[in-house]
Amino acid sequence: MSGEAWSNLDKVDQKIIEILNTNARTPSKDIAVELRKSGHDVSDRTIRKRIERLEKSGIIKGYKAVLSDVAESNEHEAVFLKFKATKSLETLKESVREHVASLPYYLMIANMDSEWNMLAILKVERGLKNPSSKIIERFSEDIIDYRITKIDFKNVNIVNMALLLL
């Protein structure tokens, strides 16, 4: 699947993906009704064909069950990291990236070209306070500064977030 396939999505495809992301079992008939409410004249047959095209192009790779836990936290935190100046900064960043990616509650890690060298976003799991502490402790000798802040995600655009992975 290429970035071009993602960039060619029209508003109807984006809305289909949004609806399926909320509930992958939504019937094509219900998706068509929802789209007609927003001014798109589409039939449920058209929706089925579009979903089939999205699957064949690799934009929709599959469907999965998402299990819920009533006590599960919906808290997230970001940790900004600033490293000591070193010749092996890229090697250090790779080590941090590998460590963060091995954590079960990690969502994202990114390099930064600013005052900070890296940003990690982590889910705060039930019973685990300050998940960023594992990163800080592991790389304490290489970190000269860090900031941890809570994040409250609202209105995430799944289509645009997926573009980050291309």
Image (spheres, helix red, strand yellow):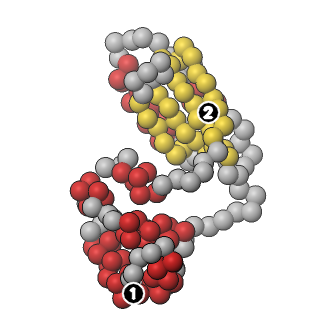
Residue visible at 74% across and 63% down in the picture: 70
Image height check: is 78 above or below 82? below
Classify residue 4 by image quadrant: bottom left
Classify residue 87 by image quadrant: top left
Q: Amino acid at mark 1?
A: Ser
Instruction: Kindly identify which numbered label has been placed on residue 119.
Output: none
Residue visible at 46% across and 57% down in the picture: 158
Looking at marks 1 and 2 on the same chain, the residue that comes earlier in the sequence is marked by: 1
Q: How far, Cα to Cα, is label 1 from label 2? A: 48 Å
Residue 69 place in picture, x, y as percent: 70, 63
Residue behind mark 1: 43
For the question of whether residue 64 can be seen, the reply is no
Residue 137 place in picture, x, y as percent: 61, 25
Residue behind mark 2: 132
Classify residue 123 by image quadrant: top right
Observer-nearest of 105 and 111: 111
Residue visible at 36% across and 77% down in the picture: 51
Quadrant (top left, top right, bottom left, bottom right) of the N terminus: bottom left
Say whether marks 1 and 2 touch (CB < 8 Å). Answer: no
> Circle 1 sits in a helix, a strand or a loop, which is it?
loop
Image height check: is 31 above or below 65? below
Q: Nearer the viewer, mark 1 or mark 2?
A: 1
For the question of whether residue 125 can be seen, the reply is yes
Residue visible at 41% across and 52% down in the picture: 160
Q: Amino acid at mark 2?
A: Ser
Image height check: is 88 above or below 28? above
